Image (cartoon, rainbow, N blue to C red):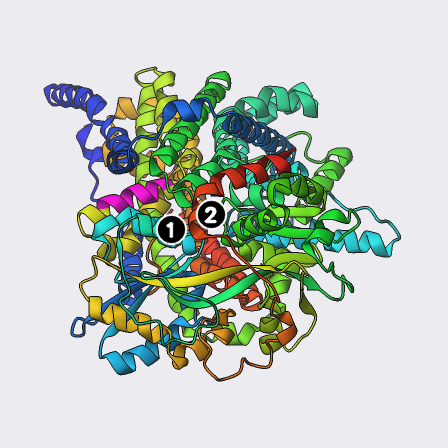
Amino acid sequence: MDKSLAVRIVTLSRMRAYRVISLWPGTLAVAFLSTLIGGSLVGIMARFGTGDLTAIVTDAYLHSVIGFTLWQATLSTLISVGLALPIARAYARQSHFVGRRALITLMGLPMVMPVIVAVLGIVAVYGHNGVITQLMRTAGFTWSFGIYGLGGILLAHVFFNLPLAVRLLLPAWEQVPGESWRLASTLGMSSTQLFRFIEWPALSAFLPGTLVIVFLLCFTSFAVVLTLGGGPGATTVEVAIYQALRFDFDPGRATLLALIQLALCATIALTMSRWLRSQPLTQGLQEGLRNRPDRKAPLNRAVDVLLITVSALFIGLPIAAVVVAGLEGPLLRVILDSALWSATARSLGIALIATLIASILALGLAMTARRLVLVQRRPGATDLVLLAGSVSLAIPPMVIGTGIFLWALMTGTTEVFTLLLIALINALMVLPYALRSIAPVLIDSGRRHHKLCEQLGLQGWQRFRRIDWPAIRKPTAFAVALGSALSFGDMGVAALFDTSGAITLPVMLYHRMSAYRFDEAAVTALVLVVMSLILFWALDRIVGRWLS
Amino acid sequence: MASKPLRPSVPKEPYVKILKILCGLASCLLAITCPTTQAAKTQLTVYTYASFVSEWGPGPLIEEHFEAQCDCDLKFVGLEDGAALLSRLKLEGDRSPADVILGLDTSLTVEAQQTGLLQGHGLDLESVNFALPWSNPVFVPYDFGYFGFVYDSEALPVPPASLTELVNNSNGPRIIIQDPRTSTPGLGLVLWMRKIFDAADEDAWAMLAPRIVTVTKGWSEAYGLFLKGEAPMVLSYTTSPAYHRHVEQTDRYRVAMFKEGHYRQVEVAARLGTSSEPQLAQDFLGFLLSDTVQNILPTSNWMLPAVLTGQPLPEAFHSDEVPQQMLRFDPAHVQNQRKQWINRWLSALSR
């Protein structure tokens, strides 16, 4: 008896220590992020001055740019997430049908395609000379979708972000305990009531993160806005930053603009997460949707089938256009080229390292966020931690890249670490996705098991291995898969650095396009899409299944 | 009682293993694919734009020929475009490892010279038989071209005969252009319009605006959309049709020759004051003007050679696609007025 009491006292005192220690992972991650981002901004300002703040604040043109950026980002986010809700619900409700996994994997593709490739795919379907316009013409109509202008921007943003939102929201349904469905069944709840009382609370943990990510992506959109915007009336802050950095060479102004963008995005993101505070769920066994009462109603089924078909076509057609264009090109010549494969290997290496860094950071932030909300009861602080992991989306990779490049230049390490630097900046870009998919599930797992773990004294590695990992395995797999595929297809950062001797696959694609070789570029794009898909599938499987 | 189940014998964790494998794989991939540098020979670093060093660009051929005669290692660093080149130079300042910068165009030369990072080429250009008038102590021109509107003859049988016609005909063809804030051809068109319409450029832009399908970030996006059939005309170079004839054996894409003439773009190279190999850099600049390089350029960079070499241009370059009238502004004037002219463009198109 004495012994067990002693053990309990030791455990208790250890728990107190643990309370402090457990804030470390997130603190370290936040410190790392702020050093990297802050350091790069300070680096630029120290070398090139801080830019003229009054000139920026009083610039009427810039005001209209900010206005337009906000407007299109808000519209894009509302449409993307608004449509993603019913579509994700349809996928959740129809949890068993042939091809479901394939369709959900397809959802991961638009995000990871280089923007220019996706835009050419979209144009091939919806453009002035696209498949749809041609079909209409054969049918005798002269109508054409106004793809250049706000309509085109929204279309492309929905194409990129709707599937992402669906994939980020889908895990919400897995959090609903079987008892809730059984109870709803007994009470004879209608489909609407199910949504109101069961699905909405479950979604509330995932919705803020999804909204924030989609909003940030649309806010900082650059090539889509310029290509499909139809004219300089459609200009985002990101364009102004690029212009300042590249053509006007005013890094101080670029940094200031980046800070303004960051402040705007952070304010909006914080407001959004305040407003949409997650509601705790009923606890119980998560046993799938077997007992969901409205699954089999014919009308619901029909609606779900319609939603799934239409969304799959909307996303699938432009991808199909990219695939067809690739198949029409000089396939063998491009594929048998060894340079293509060393570029692929290089991209793969960068993607894996970037994802590894991002996952570690995300896990650290999520652990601390959970600690803050469950033990210290400070949800506001949790929001801040989660926000810290998302803001890297609000700073143009080009600005961070320039800052880091300056530091590397000062220490004379530009040549040695080029690929590592690219991986590091990619990690910053990937982090928000990883964080937003892991954090809600980890927090939820904490809510369920925290008391039990404390009673058992289960903590640290053992707790992670036995309790948390099984819960977050699937979202982590998705995050790792999406992250690496995303970084695999990234063009922006890689183009910043010396890429002559060691080009990545997307840079190779860009080289081909800038040398008239659009047919070779089309094949390269196909290879890129197929490789992203394989990478996505393989990592999702390795992490999601084998590591159980 | 409590302590035992907490510390079970820990089996080798599968995810730790996989993590290790992933790390190993990633570092292997990077290690294999990183280019190894040869330390033995002196190295000449040349900053240029991406398409110059792509596998079809002139870069690989020039490298081969120059290395055969210089006993050195010529290293090309490919950056996005001419503007990226200049901003990289400014970022690096006197720490730049570059010996030569190649690929600035005439609208950027003054700005480049103002950095104070360049030094005179030291070559005697008097004896060079240039295809264009040239005397500049710092920059060596290696090729040049004219901006022009390329059209799809299947979609547009009769193109406009002048820029004025393109602007004034409200039933004229729809066009895709590039953004002057982010691309060189885009800036070229702003200068071209200014040259023709002078102070009335803003109104001219407003007249043209309804027929501009879209304004893209760079040349690649615009040309890609054009080839997809999104518009019958695109802003490009007068030499673009030669590519389609030479490589794709098609006469479908042609350039609309405008009566007023075409705005000229000269691509230049210069050596850096901080170069540790000034002599080698000078040799390289001279080599750019040699017949060897000049004959490579037309069918690899798709521009016109700066030097008359005696060897005629390849068949794909049609003589009726050489503008009769060459238009240009003084680079210093461009440097002074650029911002204002772009703002006029901006306000006309945002109306």
Q: What is the span of residues highlighted in magenta in the rendered image?
A: A399-407
Q: Quadrant of residue A508?
A: bottom left
Is disc 1 in contact with disc 2, using a CB cutoff of under 8 Å? Answer: yes
Res. A138 in view:
yes
Q: Position of residue A471 (x, y in %)?
A: 40, 36
Q: Which residue is mark 1?
A: B110
Question: In the image, is residue A400 part of the stretch drawn in magenta?
Answer: yes
Q: Quadrant of residue B252?
A: bottom right
What residue do we see at 55% from left, 81% from top?
B314
Q: Nearer the viewer, residue B193 or A225?
A: B193
Instruction: Tell me the amino acid under the disc marked 1.
Output: Val
Q: Position of residue B222 (x, y in %)?
A: 59, 54
Q: Secondary structure at mark 2?
A: helix
Q: Is residue B341 above or below residue B82?
A: above
Q: Quadrant of the N terminus of chain A?
A: top left
Residue at mark 1: chain: B
Q: Residue furthest bottom?
A: B311
Image check: B205 left or right of A357? right
Residue at mark 2: chain: B
Q: Which residue is mark 2?
A: B334
Badge 2 density bin: few <14, some 14–19, many ≥20, Cα 10 Å: some
Badge 1 density bin: few <14, some 14–19, many ≥20, Cα 10 Å: some
Q: Earlier in the sequence, mark 1 or mark 2?
A: 1
Cα separation between marks 1 and 2:
9 Å
Which numbered dot is residue B80? none
